[in-house]
Image (cartoon, coloured by chain):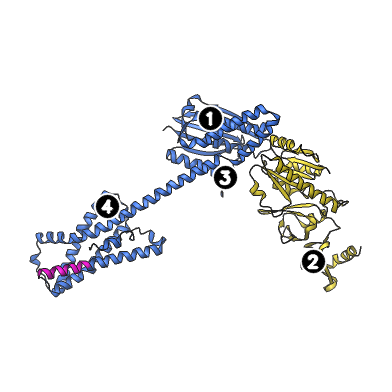
Amino acid sequence: MEIRTLLIDDEDLARQEMRHLLGAFSEIRILDEAADVTDALAKIRRHQPDLIFLDINMPGKSGFDLLAELEESPRVVFVTAYDEFAVRAFETNALDYLLKPVRPERLEKAVAAVREALSAQSAQWAGAVPTQPYGLRPDSLVFIKDGEKCYFVRLSDIFLFESEDNYVRVYFGTEKPLHRKSLNLLIEKLPPELFFRANRQQIINLAYITDIEPFFHGTLRVTLRGGIRMEISVRRAGEFKERLSL
Amino acid sequence: MAAGCVEAHTGRYGFQSSNLTNNMHRSFSKRQAYWFCQIFGWVTFVLYEIVNLLGLGFFTWEGALIMALVAPLGIGITHVYRIVLLRWRFLELPFPQMALLGLAAVFGLSFVLFVGTTFLSWGVQGSVNWSEITLNYLFMSLLNWSRYVFVWVLIYHLYSLMERINRTQIEYLDSENQLKNVELQNLKAQLNPHFLFNALNSIKALTHSDPKRAGDAVMLLSDLLRYSLNYEKQTLVPLADELAVTRDYLALEKIRFNQRLEYTLDIEPAAEKWLVPPILLVTLAENAIKHGIAQSVQGGVVQIRAHLENDQLRLEVCNTGHFLPHPDRQGIGLANIRRRLDMLFGGKAVFNLNNNNQQDTVTAAVQIPAL
């Protein structure tokens, strides 16, 4: 299996060193390098890499800013001189970090973890193709930064999106951080086979529905795993029935 | 006043009125101690006088009553004296003035006591033999009263003096402590881990691509580290030393940032002997790189200038970029520089940071007087 990789660091020598270290891994194919966040955003969108090695402290915008601007995040391994405390703010273990100068055996562990995650992913969702440009697949990773807390979450683990002012509250596991993107923008990117807009405020994950019952005036009441209940508006109920009877 | 009072006095009793509001519990016990001493002292005085009269065979009930009334009078006037001392902060006077004040107070208070007891006698006995009160009598009475008043004043002033010494000692220890903290922060600041690990990472990269340059970089880094670890042994160093280590530092950052960093040094030869606080220039250069170069994709220029003008050294570190004063966090680095300059030059050294909007640069300038 080939791991399509991008190196992102503002220092030439740091990228050179990373390239040198990664030379020991035959499956790693370095597609390109980027020296700042703007450059990196363009190159990630162009190459759609499986993995990025990402420096945190870069001119203007940080590695976190980069992730927050992406619709979908590739696998990330942070590489940092001294910011590991920042990486520790993460709530999930969907990422790894390396300290500069990087130890080869530590890198080997990080690459092994990525390899494992990627092969599990390809087995489960083989053939899933996004319907839109930059669209998301059920196994896409989404990066969410809510204040000091950061999350990497797989789309299929999210059971509810709920609009809150101009942002979206994202429910998964026991967490519900605020994602700084609008619900309308999000619905276009979400895979329609998994997510359904129940009403103006909420988007639900169909795989999490445990119960559906008729409610007042032609609306439906849906119960999600974990007991959250919501109504499907009259306007949306028809399409909802259609989708489920397919 | 009786000797027994001294123990109750010492250690528990203080005179700083401003303390009263800060520390209710402690001031309450201090206040209690004060009143205990007042009452105990004056009651002892009365008993002593009565015993004295008894022993000499001069005891009369009227005399005893007068003496008993002297106690509240004494407490009253010494308490007024204490209020005056606290109200006008006389206890903060330098020692000789305070001693003079104390002496004057002894006679002043004695005189008031004399007048007071004279009127007390008049009240109790119904008549006073005014012709008895000659100048000589007045003088002897003052001397007599002053023995007791002197003890009161002595104890009170000595105690306040002792408290003052304690306080200055605590303040001294506090400032000593602060100094140590500043030193520690400086130490941490110049062993900037960001710089250190990035430099090591650059050197590691060079070991395969350019081993000769990697070797040079190791030498630069070791010189810089050696200087960082030893600099605090001296309070001031010649500018030439600072320049040498700043050049090492810039050369290392040049390896890291490559074409993103350009730097120039413009140093007047006569300035090189001027004495400056160690690590000052390196800190300024580090700030310039952190804010001017590391934050910019295309990088920028760092210019270092040192000139003598008006018998002062003017040191400037100028970098591309714009400085935004942040109200919440005035940089620790800058605050530290200010504090160090203040400690070393007592406000005669000037440090400021200015934007030049036309050239899009920030200049940190320090003016250092001759010692």
Q: Which residue is mark 3?
A: B325
The amino acid type, in three-letter code, at marker 1 is Leu
Subunit of label 3: B
Tell which tag, 4 or 3, sits nearer the viewer: 4
Q: Which residue is mark 1?
A: B243
Rendering quarter of residue B44: bottom left
Residue A189: x percent and y percent?
82, 53
Name the mark on residue B43: none
SS label for mark 1: helix
Crowding near pointer 4: few (<14 within 10 Å), some, many (20+)?
A: some
**Dot placed on the residue nearer the N-terminal end, 1 or 4:** 4
Which residue is situated farthest in the front direction here? A105
Residue sitting nearer the eye, A212 or B44? B44
Tell me the magenta residue range: B44-58
Please, what is the dominant secondary structure of the magenta stretch? helix
Subunit of label 2: A
In this rendering, do the residues under marks 1 and 4 share a single chain? Answer: yes
Which residue is situated farthest in the top direction here? B269
Residue B331: x percent and y percent?
55, 44
* Alpha carbons under labels 2 and 3: distance apart: 50 Å
The amino acid type, in three-letter code, at marker 2 is Leu
Subunit of label 4: B
Q: Is residue B146 above or below residue A82?
A: below
Is B53 within the magenta? yes
SS label for mark 3: loop
Residue sitting nearer the eye, B262 or B14? B14
Q: Which residue is mark 4?
A: B98
In this rendering, do the residues under marks 4 and 3 share a single chain? Answer: yes
Q: Colour of chain A?
A: yellow
Q: Colour of chain B?
A: blue
What residue is rendered at 87% in x and 64% in y? A240
Name the mark on residue A224: 2
